[in-house]
Image (cartoon, rainbow, N blue to C red):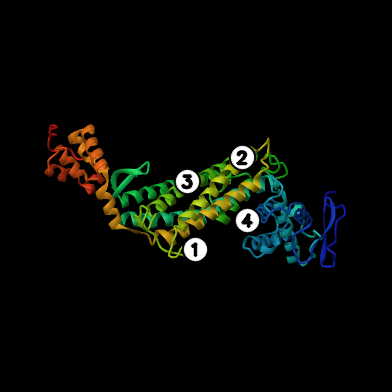
Amino acid sequence: MPHQADEADGTVRNGLRLESDSLGQIGVPADRYWGAETQRALSHFAIGDDRVPGELIRALAIIKKAAAIANQRLGRLPEEKARPIIQAAEEAAEGKLEGHFPLSIWCSGSGTQINMNLNEVIANRAIEITGGKKGTKKPIHPNDDVNLSQSTNDVFPSAMNMAVITALNDRLLPAVGQLRDGIGEKAGAWERLAKTGRTHLMDALPLTLGQEWSGYVGMLDDGLARIRVVVPWLSELALGGTAVGTGLGAPERFAGLAIGFLADLTALPLVPAPNRFTVQGAHDALVSASAMLKTLAVSLYKIANDIRLLSSGPRCGLQELILPANEPGSSMMPGKVNPTQCEVMAMVCAQVMGYDVAVALAGAGGMLEMNVYKPLMVFNILHSIRLLSDACGTFLEFLVKGAKPNEKQIEGCLDHSLMLVTALTPLLGHDRASRIARLADHEGITLREAALRLKAISPEDFDRLIDPRGMTGPAKSPQKSPKKDQ
């Protein structure tokens, strides 16, 4: 019979409790709830410092609870076993067993050791609840009872999707939304403050500072919409497919029942996947989620670099924005203050873009009935969500809220912009307007002086047409015909 060979009796010696699996016995720290498979994984996958994210642990624990309820309803798990499993799973989901999930994320590509860590911890805690002895697998077995009707191959992808949806809903969407609103407030406050526009980093037509920042609002609105698009795809769960998608080992009604309980427990729109072979052989929904995070990172990178450029100075740069002075900027240069929130946002975004490359490669690496890059994918996506959420929070609090326009500098740049000559083009034509701009630039004089020197336009028409604030909207038709060259 399975699980009987070399079965341990929970004996404690020298602070170690004997546990067993199909490979035999092994010592486990007596005060830990994990079992033999987790202990082996601690030795075989001692890689880096990246631990299994708490969001994934919670999702797995909730799945174990829902599975126990479904198995009990289906008559597969007696109440005396289901009750302690449900209680132990609830404790794990609530973080009460936090010290008992020690594994590195860098383990089996299927996540088997992580799933078994949950099974073992819940089983031993359930045994303890019943008054039994940890390590005996009696009356609760980690495989036969906690993992009943399940395989790592359907449980782990379901937990990945649930963890990502929860992190998006609870962390990222609120953080991006708050940043969007903060930038939107500035855009509204500055909607009439005209400034020099720039294309190719060269002077261009004027716009308002509010219009410029409204572009950032639109980028974040689009980013939020894109992220929301992927949630329905992530909500299609593999649970019930067991090892390869056929559902062998699970009752026919298990998937519908268990996922229904999951939806009730989490308030998430979870449903059985229409095709379990699709969601077990590939994780395209996660690849899409990562791509949307990358796109958001691209937007935030652009926003941060725009603000960094506009605030450059304070004396020798564009200096159109004044940013909060949060900390000294140099260990050597007294009084220097740097745009550190822009810099950290850019670094976070670069990291997220790199994570997405790894997720794409991992998603493409699935073979036949299973993808074996699951831990990498979920870790990168959850870490991206955490980084972006935190960076949006600090960017809002320590930059956006305190940002101010340098109105004197903005006014000076605007008044000296050669591209205001564009307003004369409908009246004079492109070539004649170009001659005015070239003369002004070559002689270091104003556009007005150049236009009058060339006798291209009357002083009255120049003053009427060159209105920087009036140029921040659709063009008005000229009221007079052009004068001939003299």
Q: Is residue 193 visible?
A: no
Q: Looking at the picture, how far across and down is residue 275, in whole percent?
A: 61, 38
Work out how far the residue at label 4 is from the one at label 3, CA to CA, in angstroms: 25 Å
Secondary element under disc 4, as helix, strand or loop, is: loop
Residue assigned mark 4: 53
Which residue is located at x 55 percent, y 51 percent?
384
Q: Nearer the viewer, mark 2 or mark 4?
A: 2
Q: Which residue is mark 3?
A: 298
Q: Picture coordinates of residue 37 (x, y %)?
A: 77, 54
- Disc 2 crowd rating (10 Å Cα; few below 14, some 14-19, many 20+) is few
Residue 158: image location, x then y, percent: 62, 48
Instruction: Name which residue type carries label 4.
Output: Pro
- Assess disc 4: are there few (<14), some (14-19) or many (≥20) residues with their C-alpha within 10 Å of its C-alpha: some
Q: CA distance from mark 2 to mark 3?
A: 19 Å
- In three-dimensional space, the C-alpha distance between marks 1 and 2, rounded to whole angstroms, equals 44 Å
First in sequence, mark 1 or 3: give its number: 3
Amino acid at circle 1? Met
The front one of 174 and 407 is 407
Circle 1 or circle 4, nearest the eye: 1
Where residue 407 sits, quadrant-wise, is bottom left
Which is nearer the eye, 147 or 314?
A: 314
Tag shown at residue 361 = 2
